[in-house]
Amino acid sequence: MSNKKNILFLLLLLIPLLFFVAPKLNKISLWHDEAFSALLIKYSFNEMIYRIGLDVHPPLYYIVLRGWTFLFKDSLFSLRFLNVLIGIITTLFLYLLVEKCSKNKKLAFFSSLLFTYSSFQIQYFFQARMYTLGVFFIVASSYFLIRALETKKWSFWILYGFFASCGIYTHYYLIFSILSQAVFLFLHFLQKFKFKAKKWLKEKNVRMTLLIYFFIFLSYLPWLKIFLRQTSQVQKNYWIPKMNIWTILATFLKLSTGAGIDAPKYWHLVIGLALIAVLTIIFFLIKNKKPFKWFVFLLLFVPFLSSIIISLKRSIYLDRYFIFVLPFYFVLITGALIEIKNKKIRNIILSLVILGNLIFFPLYWQSLKVSEKPGMDAAANYLNQEVKQNEKIVFGSSFVYFNFKYYNQTGVYPVLYSPGTLSHFSGTALLSEKDIIKDFNKLGSGKTVWLINTTGFGNYQPEIPNNWLKIEEKGFEDIQGRGWITAGKYKIQ
């Protein structure tokens, strides 16, 4: 089958995914990180960039999201549908990359199909964050790198440099992926020219490599000072839990099925799946004779190794950051299956893997019990109906404060109770003096106050003053272990 027909077939197979995912995009309540994205892009451009610098991420995703919402507004559906569109484009680039690298249309088609329907990938369609965009940039940059090596054309080298630079401006973890590409280039030239310096210098691709990486470095200089400041800020207030062996093993389950698990409790499953995944990759590396396998392997292995090494001193290891290696994980797994010589066994195993991918996300979705756990969507709807103009709204946690500000239609400006100093990961980049109240007494007397809090992450239960009389309280459960959002109505006597 030709590339055009394969790509057309892939697009047709995306239609059921769109029909399944699109109606659900606004079913899950917006959460803290997404609310940060949605509120941040409402500032003027200059102030948005300034506030991004106060946070811990680079700016490109927010710039793209700002442009998208300018065209298509900032409804929850619109905020999330951007990631769906990016995911579709990424699938097409992954097909082109694998076909160009391997000259194997079957491998390109099935690895792209598995990636497209990966539960881990689809989960991030439901988050207005930068992860899906980051995956696109690493896949696209890898494609243009291969084209540049193959053709020695300036245009492809420039496109590689542009997309690689965009990747670093999207998420800092992609530095590891760009490092993977650099390691591959070094090994490629070493294999080709050994240690003969003159041949290295005469080779156009070597000169272009040096020039493009210099361009990537220059492109990052305007943000370097902010990056160093963000790094220092993170070091002072760190929140990522320490990595351990179970953390690493559980990542294979996340990549394969999108599911999270209590790894020590289900250690048989976690170890078994990790072992199968590792042996499958080793099988592919042994059986496949084409050099492209090392390119794909490095794009998986170097980010893993880099993250583990750094995390020995300061943990930066988080499952969600490994979405950036997900396409290459599926290429290696699919490549191993295609290397199986027995056609009948190969087709059975490949069919089972595809079937698994098709059902993992529906199972994940069912496990969320979204209809029973409406979270801030329901809490805000309740408050929008009940809160009067002369009443006050106070939040005990910033991890529900920003979500409410997105949904708020009460006409009342909510404030965040924070008697102490907030950590940067609370979203302090979006806070100003008018958002904070440090003393409940400043609310006065005779007022009706709504106190909103969470029992989940960021849970801080302030001591209720003695002169506050509780009138009523309602709770709204949120998904994925984020606890309950509580809305209490009080009369200050």
Image (cartoon, rainbow, N blue to C red):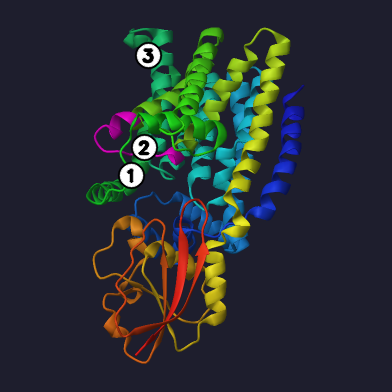
Asked whether disc 3 touches disc 1, contact meaning CB atoms under 8 Å apart, the reply is no
Magenta span contains residue 315: yes
Residue 260 location in percent, x, y?
Answer: 49, 39
Percent coordinates x, y for residue 464 in the rendering: 32, 76
In this view, the residue in front, 459 or 468, is 468
Depicted 286 relative to depicted 137: above or below: above
Question: Where is 45 relative to 58, above or below?
Answer: below
Q: Quarter of the image for the N terminus: give it.
A: top right
Which residue does the numbered mark 2 point to in the structure image?
Answer: 317
Q: Is residue 433 magenta?
A: no
* Callout 2 crowding tier (Cα within 10 Å): few <14, some 14–19, many ≥20: many
What number is the disc on residue 240? Answer: 1
Q: Nearer the viewer, residue 169 or 274?
A: 274
Q: Quadrant of the C terminus?
A: bottom left
User: Where does the magenta region start and end?
Assistant: 308-321
Do tag 1 and tag 2 residues touch (Cβ < 8 Å)? yes
Label 3, on which residue? 200
Label ID, residue 365: none
- Judged by depth in the image, the label closer to the viewer, 2 or 3, is 2
Q: CA distance from mark 1 to mark 2?
A: 7 Å
Q: Earlier in the sequence, mark 3 or mark 1?
A: 3
For the question of whether residue 439 can be seen, the reply is yes
